[in-house]
Image (cartoon, rainbow, N blue to C red):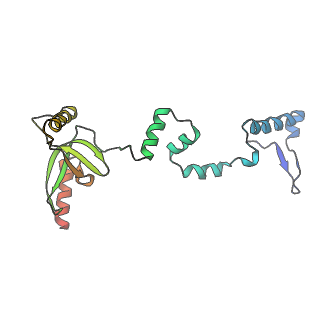
Amino acid sequence: MERLTKRLSGGAVFADNYTKYGPNIAGLILDRLAAYEDKGVAPEDTLSAVEIAKVACKLTVADAYIATGLMPERVAELAQAEKDGRLVVSRFKPGDCVWVIERDEYGEALDVAGSMFLAEVLGAVIVSAYINDMTEAEETLSYHMQETVENYDTTLMVFPSEDVYQTKAEAEAALMEADENA
């Protein structure tokens, strides 16, 4: 921003650019002051660009948008859900085939098995075995809901997220590493 005034060492202020703007300088200075007053902010209350950057670095992008009210309503809702811990971004999508390290009751890694990913929450992954050749998440969830309604018996499994992998090769490599460290 071009400075319109100059402050002398004793504190006095004068129009620095009079020669450039001539008699219009006073109007430019008044316009700039009016812009502060229109916003209800005194110039001394405004933050410098450096101070704004310092504040912004302490906020997430979502926080900054929420604070300024510039975020569309749905995005603001998702940002708030993330802050509240109600939004989980998973590595997998429902219906994906994931590979799980199966462990015994002592936590020792035994084998890897393929399962259908259903959900992830609080560091746990919920999966289902492939039942009757079902390959769609909706169909599998419907089956488990029906089993729950009919006899409160279902075969959903829950594993720590660190034991769930995208590919069989990744899971087998992790299993081998676990065996070597045992």
Quadrant location of the N terminus in the rendered image: top right
User: Is 22 on the left or on the right of 87, as rendered?
Assistant: right
In the image, farthest residue toward the bottom: 182
The number of discs equals 0
Residue 19, position as x, y percentages in the image: 88, 39
**Position of residue 116 in the picture relative to residue 17 (left or right):** left
Q: In which quarter of the image is residue 116?
A: top left
Q: Where is residue 117 in the image (x, y as percent from the top left)?
A: 22, 42
> Residue at left 66%, top 48%?
49
Horizontal and vertical percent position of residue 14: 88, 46
167 lies left or right of 122: left
Above or below, 181 relative to 173: below
- Taking the image as shown, residue 17 lies to the left or right of residue 137, namely right
Instruction: Identify which residue is drawn at 88% across, 39% down.
Output: 18
Q: Quadrant of the C terminus?
A: bottom left
> Quick one: 63 or 155, which is closer to the camera?
155
Q: Is residue 98 or residue 83 the one in the foreground? A: 83
Q: Position of residue 60 (x, y in %)?
A: 50, 47
In the image, residue 45 sits, relative to residue 77, either above or below, namely: below
- Residue lying at 87% horizontally and 33% vertically, measured from the top left: 24
